[in-house]
Amino acid sequence: MNLQTPCGNDASQTKNRSRNVAPYSGLCTRCLDSCAGNCEVFKSSLRGREVIYPGPFGELTAGADKEYPVDYSHLNIMGYALGAEAIDEANPDKAIFPDVDTATVYGHTHPVRMRMPLFTGALGSTDVARKHWDGLAVGAAISGISLVVGENVCGIDPELERDKHGRVTRSPEMERRIKKYKEWKDEYGDIIVQINVEDTRLGVAEYVVEKLGIETIELKWGQGAKCIGGEIKVSDLERALELRKRGYIVTPNPEDPASQAAFKSGAIKEFERHSRLGFIDQEEFLRSVEYLRRQVGVRRVSLKTGAYGPRELAMALKWSSRARVDLLTIDGAGGGTGMSPWRMMQEWGIPTFYLQAMAYDFAKRLATRGEWIPNLAMAGGFSTEDHIFKVLAMGSPYVKAVCMGRALMIPGFVGDNIEGVLRNGKQTSWKKLPPTVSAFGERPEQIFATYETLAEKFGKSKMEKMPLGAIAMYTYVDKLQTGLSQLMAGARSFRLDTLSRSDVVCLTEEAARISGIPYIMDAGMDEAEKILGG
């Protein structure tokens, strides 16, 4: 049984001609020499390395569609008819789901409170993040969740200013991103700036803390969508040359006369800008965390690690424990927000369910020895309220939040497209509202179910300035919060810290073996036997 289709996918804009496909190679069982395409091998014969990446760049997000043998659908949520946690009284008039507290806290000495156990994926140097930033940033702020500014934002800023040592002194794009979130933020949530190898060399942490008031820096070891550095595509030769001068890897080499000729003839339409691989060392990591706190003045340090194997996961947990890292985000295979190589996104790394099972086991072992455990968050393909419940319950008491990448970006796209039609303030490919939107009305207050709630809070004048992408994100987060509250009330848990591993069960014995969560036919059976025998 093949868990995915190797040679045809909408992400690479390829497909097989035949209905019958060899399961391992993904090639049509009957491959004709007269075929007009368009499987991945066919397209790669024409466009080569372009086919490695999902497209069109700057207009999409992409996530792996490989069907892993075990995932979170193999868990079911337990409901109870007896008792209630974190509520004054277990009776029908007191224990109602709208009273469930979905707020969470992360951070060691300077905690951050969020209205939901949720924060965005790292939205960095991709065109998608840049184009839709206002809606995404304001949406996160008014929803009371944290927002992560991803890697390379300063490094690719066309208006970047640097000193004689090559370190950033001003980045208008970074300023814009941070200012937009802070304008709308209340006491909930935080804006986190992520740094990679190039960001460190540019002095991004020092700049955003000293000049822009950032309090949280995230060190990046990797992510679940790829095992190499981040990449974007550049459609301008002069821009590609400039990024190469700034120290980035740019392929094909824009300084190569052959590459320049190919670009001018139209054979090459884009250059790829890549970040460098990061390499980890315990002492260097501890020094970096200490430097950020003591010298730069950061209040919180977080770490983002990817879908690596047990060794790197153990290092992330152990070193974060020693450094008293405020938040450790563990990103499993299956997610993705940007332009990761498509086959890499499908085929590398440990899937999120397996990785979380491993992380829980490692954290418990450290805690049993009396070692300090940082607040954990899981990322890697989440989009619904039951995902949030299952991740928090399975990871209790260590996992405090879920990182959502693509799912939290979609409302920004939707809202921006609506805004382009109704307010004429944004470029959009929509000429008019599609039936999927106009079915609810022709004005924002008709289309968005939470519009009036926000209008009551912010007033008419601010609503006219609020990006519709932000209203869309708030509406989506409101759905997640309502759904999570219902699931928690059914489990008789009225506050997040009362969720436990006993609130989920495994539907398959394989999931039980991997996770340590009981198989559904075994869970709670001891108590049942006592009742029956009493």
Image: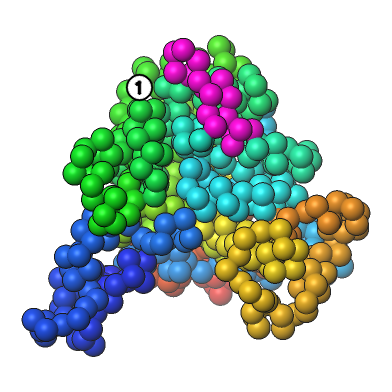
**Residue at the extreme bottom of the image, as rendered:** 19
Q: If the image is split into quadrants, where does the C terminus sit?
A: bottom right
User: Which residue position is annotated with label 1?
Assistant: 282
**Going by the image, does 167 lie left or right of 214?**
left
Q: Quadrant of residue 421?
A: bottom right
**Going by the image, does 307 lie left or right of 163?**
left
**Going by the image, does 81 lie left or right of 451?**
left
| Residue drawn at point x = 32 percent, y = 54 percent | 269
Instruction: Measuring from the top left, give residue 478's x and y in whole percent.
Output: 72, 62
Looking at this view, is 351 or 86 the one in front? 351
Secondary structure beneath disc 1?
helix
- Is 173 magenta? The answer is yes
For the image, the number of numbered tags is 1
| Residue drawn at point x = 70 percent, y = 41 percent | 180
- Is 62 magenta? The answer is no
| Residue drawn at point x = 67 percent, y = 76 percent | 432
Q: If the image is split into quadrants, where does the N terminus sit?
A: bottom left
| Residue drawn at point x = 53 percent, y = 24 percent | 161
Instruction: Measuring from the top left, give residue 367's x and y in whole percent.
Output: 47, 34
Looking at this view, is 496 or 295 the one in front? 295
On the question of residue 359 being in view, the answer is no
Relative height, residue 404 to residue 309 (above, below): below
**Going by the image, does 138 lie left or right of 207?**
right
On the question of residue 461 being in view, the answer is yes
Instruction: Measuring from the top left, give residue 433's x and y in whole percent.
Output: 67, 76
Relative height, residue 517 to residue 292 (above, below): below
Per the rendered image, the range of residues in magenta is 159-175
Q: What residue type is labelled 1?
A: Gln
